[in-house]
Image (cartoon, coloured by chain):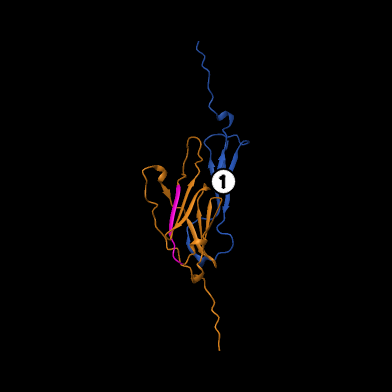
Chain colours: A orange, B blue
């Protein structure tokens, strides 16, 4: 296994089981892919039906929270239902190796891509050795 | 008479090459998909519309004229 210099997002707080008193407060945990590249971590989450204005991504106290609300789009009477549009919610705990001020987010076709750059000190640095 | 809607596509995983060992977590599905649904009524296949927005596909299939409910006038003698 290759060495991972940015470790993790040690995940996570799974609060997706909590239920509110209203049905709108039901949440589903979106599946994610998390991988590492030279710059840091990349998180990809599937949030079908969620438009930018209904997406909330925030970092607070080392906690990264993703919240998405899909637009309701089911006119008429349901005949067959396999899939329900429910809110998305997922949280991750970040460690100090991520530069939280440089996190960026992109949403396309319902897929959220988060870039979590490594903090400068966490990047591998080559140290030049001078030999006298 | 067949009334079948078939959707095919491919869900790409990641742009560019990512080595398997670089993954911390891999939960999303990816790859080719196909789904074929038998419709419960006849539809007007000249008026089918499909919209793809935010990763959701919405297909609207109007009922064929003969499948619409028709009111029958009752003659009372």
Can see residue A51? Answer: no
Judge the density around disc 1: few (<14), some (14-19), many (≥20) Cα neighbours within 10 Å: some
Which residue is rendered at x = 60% and y = 39% of the image? Answer: B49
Q: Main secondary structure of the magenta part?
A: strand
How far across and down, in percent of the image, does residue B50 sit? 59, 42
Judging depth in this view, the residue of B10 and A20 nearest the camera is A20
Q: Secondary structure at mark 1?
A: strand
Is residue A48 magenta-colored?
A: no
Query: Residue B12 is drawn in which quadrant?
Result: bottom right
In-image side of A98 versus B47 (left or right): left
The magenta segment is: A87-96
Which quadrant does the N terminus of chain B fall into? top right
What percent of the width, then of the height, locates residue B15? 58, 59
Task: Write the residue at 58% across / 50% down.
Answer: B9
Q: Residue A45's spot in the image, x, y percent?
A: 50, 55
Please name the residue that numbered disc 1 is placed on: B53
The answer to whether any part of residue B38 appears in the image is yes
Q: Is residue A129 above or below residue A70?
A: below
| Residue under the point 44% across and 51% down | A89
Residue A88 is inside the magenta segment? yes
């Amino acid at each position: 296994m290759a060495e991972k210099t940015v470790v993790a997002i040690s995940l996570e707080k799974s609060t997706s089981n909590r239920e509110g008193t209203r049905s709108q407060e039901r949440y589903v945990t979106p599946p994610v892919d998390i991988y590492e590249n030279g710059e840091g971590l990349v998180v990809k989450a599937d949030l079908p039906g969620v438009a930018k204005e209904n997406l909330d991504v925030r970092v607070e106290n080392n906690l990264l929270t993703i919240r998405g609300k899909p637009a309701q789009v089911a006119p008429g009477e349901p005949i067959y239902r396999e899939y329900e549009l429910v809110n998305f919610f997922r949280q991750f705990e970040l460690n100090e190796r991520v530069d939280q001020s440089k996190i960026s987010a992109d949403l396309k076709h319902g897929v959220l891509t988060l870039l979590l750059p490594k903090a400068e000190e966490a990047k591998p640095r080559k140290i030049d050795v001078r030999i006298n | 008479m067949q009334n079948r809607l078939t959707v095919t596509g491919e869900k790409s995983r990641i742009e560019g090459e990512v080595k398997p060992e670089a993954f911390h977590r891999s939960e999303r599905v990816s790859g080719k998909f196909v789904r074929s649904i038998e419709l419960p009524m006849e539809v007007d296949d000249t008026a089918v519309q499909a919209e793809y927005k935010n990763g959701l596909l919405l297909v609207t299939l109007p009922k064929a004229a003969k499948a619409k409910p028709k009111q029958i006038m009752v003659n009372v003698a």
